[in-house]
Image (cartoon, helix red, strand yellow):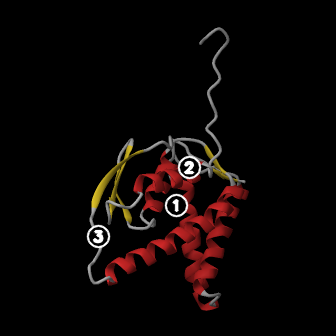
Amino acid sequence: MIVMNFRSRPNPSLPLAAVAWRLGLFSALWFLLSGGDIKSWPFGLAASLLATWFLMRLPSKQPRRVRLLAIVWFIPYFVGRSLLSGVDVMRRVLHPALPIDPALVDYPLVIDHQGGRVLLANCVSLLPGTISARLGPDILLVHSLDKGLPVVETIKDLERRIARLYHPAAKAKRPEGQP
């Protein structure tokens, strides 16, 4: 299980294991992106250290724990929808009649935390024929290439899947005798 720490202020005194885990993750990502080229490692190590430092300094507000198994199930869905999106846009652009009928759709957000909302807005941009135009406090404005696309239904499905990535927020306990 991955724990994402959301605090109102940066917390520079995180456990060494948390720092090491993040540094290892960024280093592995660098290794994959560089193709294992040993000549790039001085820059890669510096980039990994800097990325780890920035990640540890990010201010956050709500505690959310991410479900690792849910991420494993989300990745194939996300990759599949992204590929479908690319094919759909390519088909529309290459079609002689250019079958587009653009629209703006206001989508009321159900996810109650900023991390999930930002992830939703970013993922919507990779759905077939859609792109996030603006993320408001309670509304996501989505630009659609075609009014006939099931934009709201597709985003509802995506939002449901993203909500499953996170453990529910802990409810505050009320003192005895209070409603």
Task: Report crowding for label 3: few under 14, some 14 to 19, many 20 or more residues within 10 A (C-alpha).
Answer: some
Q: Which residue bears the numbered disc 2?
A: 160
Seen in the image, is 175 located left or right of residue 160? right
In the rendered view, tell whether residue 4 sits above or below residue 27: above
Circle 1: element type: helix
Determine the residue located farthest toward the top in the rendered image.
177
Seen in the image, is 85 located left or right of residue 75? left
The quadrant of the image that shows the N terminus is bottom right
Gap in angstroms between the C-alphas marked 1 and 3? 41 Å
In terms of image quadrants, where is residue 151? bottom left
Which mark is first along the chain, 2 or 3?
3
In the rendered view, tell whether residue 141 sits above or below residue 41: above
Give, as a three-letter code, the residue at label 2: Arg
User: Residue 82: where, in percent of width, then height?
Assistant: 50, 71
Q: Nearer the viewer, mark 2 or mark 1?
A: 2
Circle 2: element type: helix
Residue 45 visible to the viewer: yes
Give, as a three-letter code, the residue at label 3: Ile
Which mark is first along the chain, 3 or 1?
1
Q: Which residue bears the numbered disc 1?
A: 54
